[in-house]
Image (tube, rainbow, N blue to C red):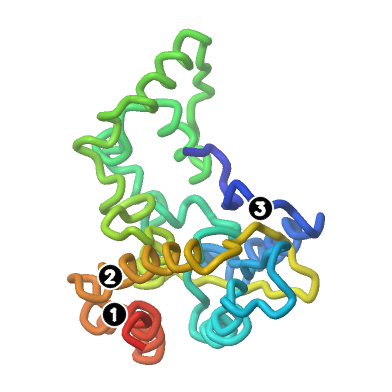
Amino acid sequence: MSNGPYVLVLDCDMYCNDPTSARQAMCFHLDPEISRSLAFVQYPQMFYNVSKNDINDNQSRSTYKMKWQVMDGLRGPLFTGTGYSLKRKALYGTPNQEGAFLHEPKKTFGLSSKFIASLKDINDQDINGKEFTQDVIVEEAMILAGCTFEKGTKWGKEIGYAYDSLLESTFTGYLLHCKGWRSVYLYRKRPCFLGCTTVDMKDAMIQIMKWCSGLFQVAFSRFSPLTYGVSRTSILQSMFHGSITFAPLH
């Protein structure tokens, strides 16, 4: 939940390794040639605690040095869970739905009037200068923190991150591509962000099992790239999405 037009998504163990990283991402977001349809800029996921040989391939070199670079030529890579700069508006509709996500906002987004006002703000619409007192802000916070905030709304279905997969970030990135959004892969010689990865085979296998389960949930659902994706993206793009979601079978 944010009121910023752009959001930087990082795992809690990641830190900025290059102070110019935000400016590098905004060079893409503000590029008039692609900005209208650009949903996010993805950085490679790099780690500071990998061993010299990295026998477990915690760096996922095949993904970040090959697959994502190939996908950069096919309207961009998917979300990789962390290390990306996201245009918040992309979570609410398609590139051609200018302001359409504000139709019946309370039924779509819930009862937070402050959050809805922030949506109008990023859509360059007048929010009537509405001021929020301290009591109203406390009331808003209680609404947002409530367990029933999303009930009866479109969160997790048509807006926000998709809920139908354990690997919600990759699934959401795939759905954004299906809606017509594109992404960009920003691979620099100096890593923009560094994080902490697993250090033994046991933890690595637990993480891989979670990833595989999440990918299978997409691959064998109604959102499969072989059916849903192929009708909404190019053949090459849907084939690549399929190679990712069916990767556990390799």
Residue 129 image label: none
Residue count near mark 1 (Cα–Cα under 10 Å), binned few <14, some 14–19, many ≥20: many
The percent position of residue 46, horizontal first and vertical second, equals 67, 67
Residue 218's mark? 2
Q: Amino acid at mark 3?
A: Met
Q: CA distance from mark 1 to mark 3?
A: 31 Å
* Mark 1 in CB contact with mark 2 (< 8 angstroms): yes
Kind of element beneath mark 2: helix
x and y, in percent, of residue 118 in the image: 49, 35
- Give the class, few, some or many, for how many residues have Cα within 10 Å of label 3's Cα (few <14, many ≥20): some
Disc 2, disc 3: CB below 8 Å? no
**Which residue is most to the bottom?**
236
Q: Quadrant of the C terminus?
A: bottom left
Residue 95 appears in view: no
Q: Image quadrant of residue 242? A: bottom left
Mark 3 lies on a secondary structure that is loop
Q: Is residue 191 left or right of residue 72?
A: right
Q: Quadrant of residue 197?
A: bottom right
Q: For mark 1, what is the residue?
A: 225
Identify the residue shown where x is 52% and y is 11%: 133
Q: Is residue 69 left or right of residue 180?
A: right
Residue hosting label 3: 14
Instruction: Find the distance from the CA under tag 2 to the CA under tag 3.
Output: 27 Å
- Residue 175 shown left or right of residue 148 in the figure: right
The mark lying in front, picked from 1 and 2, is 2
Earlier in the chain: of badge 2 and badge 3, it is 3
Residue visible at 69% across and 75% down?
A: 187
Q: Which amino acid lies under the numbered mark 2 shown in the image of this protein?
A: Val
Amino acid type assigned to the residue bearing label 1 in the image: Pro
Q: Is residue 152 visible?
A: yes
